Amino acid sequence: MINNRLSVAHPRILLLTSVCALLFVACGDDKVAGGTEAESTIALFIQTADGTPASAARVRILPNDYLSSGPAEKAWNETNEDGHVSFEVRKGRYTIEARNVNNSKASGAVHSVALDENSDSKVDTIKLGELSSIEGFVVLGESAPVVRVAGLDRYVVPDSAGHFVIDSLPQGRFDVQIGEPQEVYSTTIQTDAGDTLFVDGSDTSSSIKVVKSKPSTVSKYPESDWSAHEALLKQLVGYAEGTLGAAGTTDRSGKISEAKGEICVVTTTEDYVLVKDSAMVASGSLRECAEKDGSVWVLFENDGTYKLQAPLRIKSNKTIDGRGRDIRITGMGILTNESSNLIFENLTFTAPSITAQDTTSRRALSIHNMTHHVWVDHCLFEEYPLIELDVKRRSYAVTVSWSRFENAQSGILFGLEPDIYVDSLQTLTLHHNYFANLELRGVPARYGKIHVYNNFFSDVEMVGIECSDSALCYIENNVFNVEKPVTDYRLENQDGTPDVATQGFVYMRDNLFGLGGENLAGDARGFKPDYRVVVEKADAELAVRVKNEAGPR
C-alpha cells in the first residue's frame, strides 16, 4: 500500500526489501502538542514472552512521525526490577520501542500510544517477542539517500551498491521512508509479514508502484513420468527452440527428431571409485548416466552434492533434471564437445575444485566446440573465480532462462576475443535471469547474435552487458541497477575514447535504469531475433519476480 507520491522531482529510485519476521504499521500525521500544555503520564509494564517482568529492559518513546537525522540520537530509559517504567509527555501520538537481552538472546516490541485532550494518563502492558530485520536495495540517482523508520531512532545509509540492512527491529508495523537526511521526498511504504517489496519511483509523474512478492513455485519430482518432461519442454523459448533433450535424438546432420529415451536415476553422490587400484566410474553416479549413449533422462533419487573429480564431458540427447531435489554440482564442472540436444534443469553449480583466478579455471558449464540446441533453466551458478557459464567456439541455438549468476568476476561469456577465435554464427537467448555480486561483467558478448530480455542486473561493478567485437546485441525490457548498464566496445584508446576495432552493434529499447544509463542508439545492423516471445514490461513487478523466482525451485 502506498501512502503518498514523491513530492518533488528527483533521480530514479529502486528499492528491493526483504522482511524477515512480522512487521509494519503506519504512524499517523498528528504532531506533538507544544506550548505550555500540561504533561501526561504513560506508564508501561514490560513483560518477556512468557509473561514474567522484564527488568532492566530498555524503553524509548518518540513522536510517531519522528525521523532520525543521524545514528543513535535518542537515549533509552530502563525498567525497574518489576518491569515498570513511566514517561511524562504532552498530548499526541507516540511510538514506544522496548528491547531486552536475556542470556544473550534479544527480544523486543513496538507499541503505539495516543493521548488526546481527555487523556491525563495511559497504562499499558507490552510483551516482548522475536526481533526481525529488513534487508533491501535502494538507488536514488546521484544523491545519497538514507533509510529511516518513522517513530523509531533508525537511520541507515546504504553502502556503495545501495544495499542496506535495518536489524534488531521488534515485531510490529512500521512506516519506512527513503530520502535525503534533511528532505524526505521518497515514498512511504507499508508491508505485512514476509513481504518482499520492489518500489519503482522512476516515473515522478505517476504514483509509486509497490509489488509484493508471491511464494515461489516449488518443483515436484517427476517420478519418471514422461508427461512431466513434456510439460517442461512447453516452457522453452528462444534460440534453443526445438531442443527435446531426452525426448529426442540427433542425426549426423544435426537435425533433432522425437524419440523417447531411457530413464537413468542417480543413486549415489560418488563419482569415481577405486577397483583394484584403478579408478572406475561409480555405479549409479551422475557421470554414468550423463556419459551414456543415446537419449537419457537423468533424475536424482536424493538431494545431494555431486563432486566431479574430473570434467564431465556430457554426450548428446540428455536432460539433467533436478526438479524436486536439491542438486549441487561441485568440482570440475560440465563440458560439451560437439554435443547437441541438451537440457540442464533445476541445478546448483557451486564450490569448484579450481579457485585460482586464471584461465585454467573450469567453468561450471562450458558450452563449446560446435555444440547446439542447449537449454539451461532454473539453475544457480555461484562462487566461481572467473566465468560461470560460457558459450563459445561455434556453439549456437542456446537459451539460458530463469537462472542466477552470483559471486564471480563475470556471469556468462558469449564468444571469445578475436585473437583466440572468431565466429559470427553463435546465437544465444537470455531471459529472466538474475545477475548479482559480479566483479566485472554480467555478460561479455563477442561476435554472434544475442537476445537479452527481461533480465535483472542488480549488482555488477563494471558493466551489465559488454557488446563488443562485432557482436549483434538486441537488448530489451531489462532492469539495470548498475552504474554502467551496456557498452558497445571492449577496449578504450589512451585518450579514453572507444577503440572502434572492438566495437559491437547494439539495439536497445524499453529498459529500466536505476543507477543511470540510457538506451543506446543503434540498430544492431538490422538484427532482430527471428522467433516470437512474450516480452514483459521492465518494471517493479518484473524485477521482484526475477529476483525471487530465478534459480532452482
Image (tube, rainbow, N blue to C red):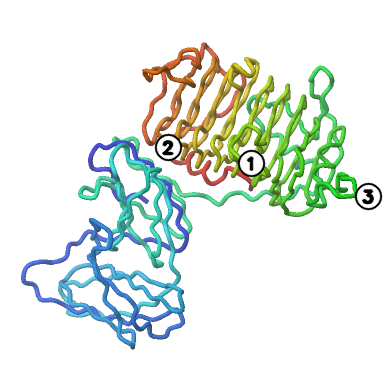
Label 2 crowd bin: few (<14), some (14–19), many (20+), radius 10 Å: many
Residue 378 shows which numbered tag? Answer: 1
Q: Position of residue 212 (x, y in %)?
A: 46, 49
Q: Residue furthest bottom?
A: 82
Asked whether the viewer can see residue 210, the reply is no
In the rendered image, which residue does mark 2 sit on? Answer: 481
Lower position in the chain sequence, tag 2 or tag 3: 3
Q: Quadrant of residue 230?
A: top right
Label 1 crowd bin: few (<14), some (14–19), many (20+), radius 10 Å: many
Q: Amino acid at mark 1?
A: His
Q: Position of residue 278 (x, y in %)?
A: 90, 45
What distance separates the C-alpha of mark 2 from that of mark 3? 56 Å
Asked whether the viewer can see residue 156, the reply is yes
Residue nearest the viewer, comparing 33 with 291: 291
Q: Residue furthest left?
A: 36
Q: Element at badge 3?
A: loop
Q: Amino acid at mark 3?
A: Lys
Judge depth for marks 3 and 1 and give the one in front.
3
In the rendered image, which residue does mark 3 sit on? Answer: 276
What distance separates the C-alpha of mark 3 from that of mark 1? 40 Å
In the displayed structure, would residue 369 be above or below residue 279?
above
Which residue is drawn at the image coordinates 43% and 60% (left, top)? Answer: 133
What distance separates the C-alpha of mark 1 from that of mark 2? 22 Å
Asked whether, in this view, residue 296 is left or right of residue 522, the answer is right
